[in-house]
Image (spheres, grey):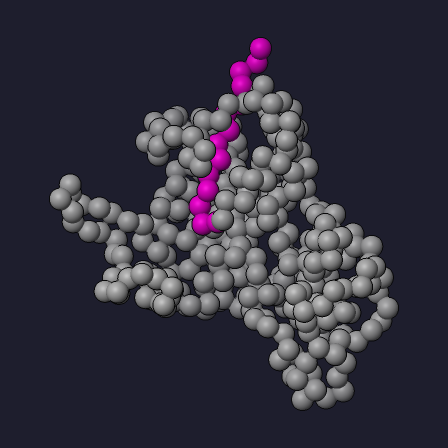
Amino acid sequence: MAEKLKIGIYWAASCGGCEIGILEIGDKLLTLLEVADLVFCPCILDFKYDDVRAMPDGGIDVCLFNGGIRNSENQEIAELLRRKSKVLVAFGSCACEGGIPSLGNLFDCSELLQRAYTTESTDNPKGIIPGPGHHVAEGEVHLPVVQSRVKRLQDVVEVDYFMPGCPPHEKMVWAVVEAIASGKLPPRGSKVGVGDKSVCDECKRERRGVKIKAFKRPQEIIPEDGWCLLEQGLLCLGSSTRSGCEARCLDANMPCRGCYGPAGQARDQGAAILSAVGSMLDADSIEKAEEIVKTLMDPAGTIYRFGMAESMLVRHLPEKGQG
């Protein structure tokens, strides 16, 4: 029997949904365990960083790294796993594009820490904000330092493959496992399991050429089946988002939120959707257009929900202080 593959899975600045995405391959997990050993996955097993440091460089065949780089620990482990892994995969939207945590890039660290530790919902009457070091009876306690902004995995280390999605589709996960097991890997730097077109190309909904009079939030309307959600006033990012998800959110009457990243040659996903939406507004003046746009709640958080770390809006701003 050939030697089993050694697989690592790491969770940085993310919600943990990518681990659930891996479990969604279902009974194929048994097939995976026949050909691979899990040598690092602190989410589910008692692995320590020193276990990884003791491995030979390149000792992990493939590492699925999910989450962006928010603090010094995330960056240290990204660099460590890069050395120890033959193949490093940016797994999920947060690793590929920054994800929802990168919306924090609109604020500096002091604002984020104040929000987390001194607002009404936090039981912290003394207003104590954790620092990088603290002395206790047992010795010195060191905490990770919050960095000035969330970065993509590729911003700190070299990445071999990219698997976008929140989380990646289970078919994509299994396709990568099969490719690694067979040795038939795509060209380095490839985005795996996605298409070259947009989600609109996968969507079965009808476009009727209707102009947008106002934007609605999903809980405010019951959309008509079969009709383009954007024309119904729900901000759908399908026209600017890479295909490959089979338009599953749209099938459930929910607009695309853009988790597969920008479609085609778009340099900035948010700019691409604004360009598309601008031509659909029912407005014959700048004033009327501004009135319609004001009905869009949290525009930055909506059009850059998953991609703020790679947007032109923030990437060209000077970095702010660390926490």
Q: Give the range drawn in magenta.
A: 1-14
Q: Where is residue 235 in the image (x, y as percent from the top left)?
A: 68, 67
Residue farthest to the top?
1
Position of 210 relative to 207 (above/below)? below
Q: Can residue 164 be seen in this view?
A: no
Q: Quadrant of the N terminus?
A: top right
Classify 20 as above or below 250: above
In the picture, measured across the screen, residue 265 lies left or right of residue 140, that is: right
| Residue at the left extreme of this rendering | 137
Count of labels in the image: 0
271 part of magenta stretch = no
Vertical comparison of 48 with 221: above or below: above
Q: State which quadrant residue 262 falls in.
A: bottom right
Identify which residue, 116 or 104, lies in the foreground: 116
Relative height, residue 174 to residue 278 (above, below): above
Q: Is residue 168 visible?
A: yes
Q: Quadrant of residue 125?
A: bottom left
Between residue 267 and residue 293, name the one nearer to us: 293
Q: In the image, 98: left or right of 226?
A: left
Picture residue at 73% right of the left edge, 71% below the top: 233
Q: Which residue is drawn at 58% across and 34% down?
A: 23
Q: What x and y, as percent, mark residue 74?
A: 40, 46
The residue closer to the viewer here, 303 or 220, is: 220
Across and down, in percent, residue 199 comes to 73, 55
Q: Is residue 13 magenta?
A: yes
The quarter of the picture where the C terminus appears is: bottom left
**Residue drawn at (72%, 88%), measured in percent from left and top?**
285
Which residue is drawn at the image coordinates 85% and 71% (left, top)? 209
Q: x, y percentage for residue 310?
A: 54, 59
